[in-house]
Image (tube, coloured by chain):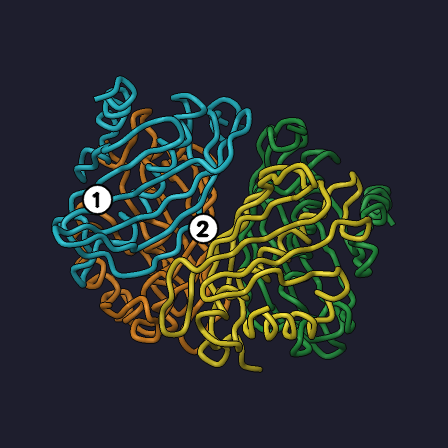
Chain colours: A cyan, B orange, C green, D yellow
Amino acid sequence: MTEMLAIGRQVLASQPFSALIGAQLAHFAQGEAVLEVPISDKVQQQHGFVHGGVVSYAADNAITFAGGSVLGPGVVTSEFKINYLRPAVGDKLVARASVLHTGKTQAVCRCEIYTVTKAQETLCAAAQGTIARVGAEPKQEKE
Amino acid sequence: MTEMLAIGRQVLASQPFSALIGAQLAHFAQGEAVLEVPISDKVQQQHGFVHGGVVSYAADNAITFAGGSVLGPGVVTSEFKINYLRPAVGDKLVARASVLHTGKTQAVCRCEIYTVTKAQETLCAAAQGTIARVGAEPKQEKE
Amino acid sequence: MTEMLAIGRQVLASQPFSALIGAQLAHFAQGEAVLEVPISDKVQQQHGFVHGGVVSYAADNAITFAGGSVLGPGVVTSEFKINYLRPAVGDKLVARASVLHTGKTQAVCRCEIYTVTKAQETLCAAAQGTIARVGAEPKQEKE
Amino acid sequence: MTEMLAIGRQVLASQPFSALIGAQLAHFAQGEAVLEVPISDKVQQQHGFVHGGVVSYAADNAITFAGGSVLGPGVVTSEFKINYLRPAVGDKLVARASVLHTGKTQAVCRCEIYTVTKAQETLCAAAQGTIARVGAEPKQEKE
């Protein structure tokens, strides 16, 4: 494991919500992050699909890590959009995020979210958003 | 409680993920839905704020209910975008969604997400997205 | 006419593209801007509707002015999303933007775009996005 | 020139607004479209950059063509989001769109928008949105 991945996993482990749903950081490198969520009953909605809110969590958190890989550890997601493409069913959710452009205080990232089974991977959602360095953004100050 | 709210609460209760984080439907009427999530450790990230993924869940689910109030029960969120405005701290998260426009198979909704304490409400995020009737959208078919 | 509106109109008049399509600033005050585009052949697509790109221009520019009303004149749109609700037909396009939240360097705005005839106004699109102060954002520096 | 590109160019030529700003279809194939806009004074804002509204037009129209390449000619953009990454300066704007996912009545597309000079290409914006078949969507009916 790289030192960067080890640090990233510590950050993720310190997020109670991420721990609650069992999210794991599978890959973390300059400009890239892969976040996985095991699919079990607790992340589902009423039809047995992964709840859209969990898919959006995975996208949000994966782009935050990708942005943090180029901007430094103190970052947050400022905004993002997500398109749901297919119902999310499978063994795990895999969110692959990468940085499109980095500025001084912000990075714009994209993310593709797949559902994975032994046999195959299926694209189930796609996201795009902005990550901002904390302190650089007014929204990070208590008002 | 209206019959509509009672039915909405049954739907929400049948979503294991919504139950996991204690989400509740506070209001459900034609073109409107209010979803609440109590704020405790388990929905937080590492700095004691509500995890962005939980805020996006609340937005996503609130607009799905709002869209369902005009399109019927079989609906999903096709896409949405969210802007995070302030760190989410307080006693509960309140997502207020309303329908901007309804078509035959889709509705476009907006949502404002507040954090609430005894003393005050604070706007912490804003979202906009599309709800689609299931079956009307290709994404709802197993492929 | 307020001094603020007069200044806003000078800014708009200095944008060659806005002049090309005849855009006008109808209202400009703290946290608010209303931009109008007369509907003629030149802003249409092949079916006689206003081109979506012109509707998105109106949304983009209206939120830039709204953001500028609270952040100061040197601002740009960082990002926005738009939902098209109905085909845009009528005498003019009216984009009404307002500020949802202002930080030190950014403002998040919403915009509703209407088509207007003598008889009525019709909501044809809705947008939400982020305005950033120039210089505060890396994207504004030549790289 | 392929027959598909020839047809696409006829469609673009029939859009008065696209003709006004000199937009051209450079490539049009299954799941892909490349739209170009020559950069001259008339598409600029007050600082000599291409107006954000023209960049968003290019993104919007490029994804409409990409979506149309898989859904058929009668399509419209339902919604999209765009992140502006750098000021757009150069000889021409090149919007490259591709289809991420196609359903029965909708396609989700992405687009990268570059500014091009003799010496180089520079990514200046990125977009993601939904294209819908006309008639399949309520928004396409006069109400």
In terms of secondary structure, where does tag 2 sit?
A: strand
Q: CA distance from mark 1 to mark 2?
A: 22 Å
| Amino acid identity at mark 1 | Ile
What is the three-letter code of the residue carrying label 2? Lys
D3 and B46: which one is in front?
D3
- Checking the image for residue B21, the label placed there is 1
Crowding at dot 2, Cα within 10 Å, few <14 / some 14-19 / many 20+, comes out as: many
Viewer-closest of C131 and B115: C131
Badge 1: few (under 14), some or many (20 or more) residues near its Cα, within 10 Å? some
Closest to the camera, between mark 1 and mark 2, is 2
Image quadrant in which you'd find residue C92: bottom right
Q: Earlier in the sequence, mark 1 or mark 2?
A: 1
Q: Position of residue C139 (x, y in %)?
A: 61, 33
Tell whether C56 sits left or right of B50.
Answer: right
**Element assignment for label 1:** loop
Q: Chain of mark 2?
A: B
Residue B55: image quadrant is: top left
Determine the chain carrying the residue at label 1: B
Say whether residue A10 is visible.
yes
Tell whether A12 sits left or right of B123.
Answer: left
Which residue is depicted at the point 79% across and 56% down?
C26
**Residue C100: which disc?**
none
Q: Is residue A140 above or below residue B83?
A: above
Q: Residue at x 40, y 27 (%)?
A: A68
Look at mark 2 in the image and give the residue it sits on: B81
> Residue A90 in the image: x percent, y percent?
16, 54
